[in-house]
Image (cartoon, rainbow, N blue to C red):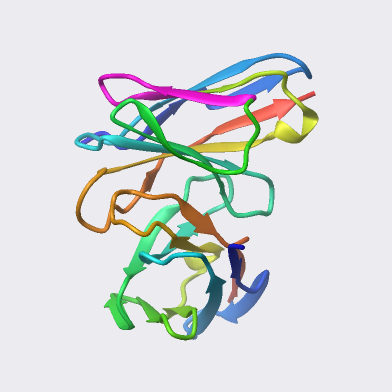
């Protein structure tokens, strides 16, 4: 089966660092995506990993270990506007031609002053 | 550069009715995927269209059908609506070949079935 797990909710303080973990078990793997979704809005792309290691993009970084079926999203210097749901998604297609995304349930992050 | 657009924004239907949702992909994209997102859950893949054909399908019944037009826009049709079909329906567009095929999402259509 296909399964993606991430914590349901997390709380952090403004200015701090938070790490959101994601573990996956899928029949194939061709990339892992992180999306941010504010309430009532569409998901917006944050990061993409297809090889092992860390991808850094401003205040956001994402890490992937394919052998462990594990990824994390790291958010630094948290701001109030970072309060949102963070979605981990795996593209399970065996070929790089689009392919469906399998999403986790999302992690609701609340940033407190 | 127009992003992904969807219509309508909101829709209220009653059980047993049929609904059609529409999506226009981001400029330059040729692939459209549809997702259903229930409240508090992640999006669930319904199907994907490329070159006017359904290329992949998720675990949704035949009541869910779609179409892609030559201009790459797409429709999602749901027949015999059930209460459980109430959700946010998201359309995502991407390039069918090459690259990381990042999917860009539209604002969604909120469907309520009474």
Q: Nearer the viewer, residue A36 or A93?
A: A93
Q: Nearer the viewer, residue B103 or B4?
A: B103
**Image quadrant containing the C terminus of chain A:** bottom right
Q: Nearer the viewer, residue A98 or B37?
A: A98
Residue B81: x percent and y percent?
72, 22
Left or right, residue A15 beside residue B71: right
State whether residue A22 is above or below residue B66.
below
Which quadrant of the view contains residue A3?
Answer: bottom right
> Any magenta on residue B67?
yes
Q: Nearer the viewer, residue A69 or A109?
A: A69
Please give the name of the residue rendered at 52% of the width and 62% of the height, measured from the top-left corner.
A87
Left or right, residue A87 beside residue A99: right
Residue farthest top in this picture? B17
Left or right, residue A65 beside residue B80: left
- The residues colored magenta run B63-75
Please give the name of the residue rendered at 37% of the width and 57% of the height, measured from the top-left corner.
A45
**Image quadrant containing the N terminus of chain A:** bottom right
Residue A79: x percent and y percent?
46, 72
Residue B88: x percent and y percent?
60, 38
């Amino acid at each position: 089966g296909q399964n993606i797990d991430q914590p349901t909710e997390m709380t952090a303080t403004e200015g701090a660092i938070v790490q959101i973990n994601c573990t996956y078990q899928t029949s194939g793997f061709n990339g892992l995506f992180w999306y941010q979704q504010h309430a009532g809005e569409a998901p917006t792309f944050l990061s993409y990993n297809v090889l092992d290691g860390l991808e850094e993009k401003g205040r956001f970084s994402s890490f992937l270990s394919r052998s462990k079926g594990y990824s994390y999203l790291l958010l630094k210097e948290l701001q109030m506007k970072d309060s949102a749901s963070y979605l981990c998604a795996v593209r399970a297609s065996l070929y790089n031609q689009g392919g469906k995304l399998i999403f986790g349930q999302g992690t609701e992050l609340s940033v407190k002053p | 550069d127009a992003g992904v657009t969807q219509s309508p924004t909101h829709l209220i239907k009653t059980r047993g009715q049929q609904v059609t949702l529409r999506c226009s992909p981001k400029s330059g994209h040729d692939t459209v995927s549809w997702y259903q997102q229930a409240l508090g859950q992640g999006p669930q893949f319904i199907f994907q269209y490329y070159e006017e054909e359904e290329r992949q399908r998720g675990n949704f019944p035949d009541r869910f059908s779609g179409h892609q037009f030559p201009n790459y826009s797409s429709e999602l049709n749901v027949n015999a609506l059930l209460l459980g079909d109430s959700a946010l329906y998201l359309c995502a567009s991407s390039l069918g070949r090459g690259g990381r095929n990042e999917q860009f999402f539209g604002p969604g259509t909120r469907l309520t079935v009474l």
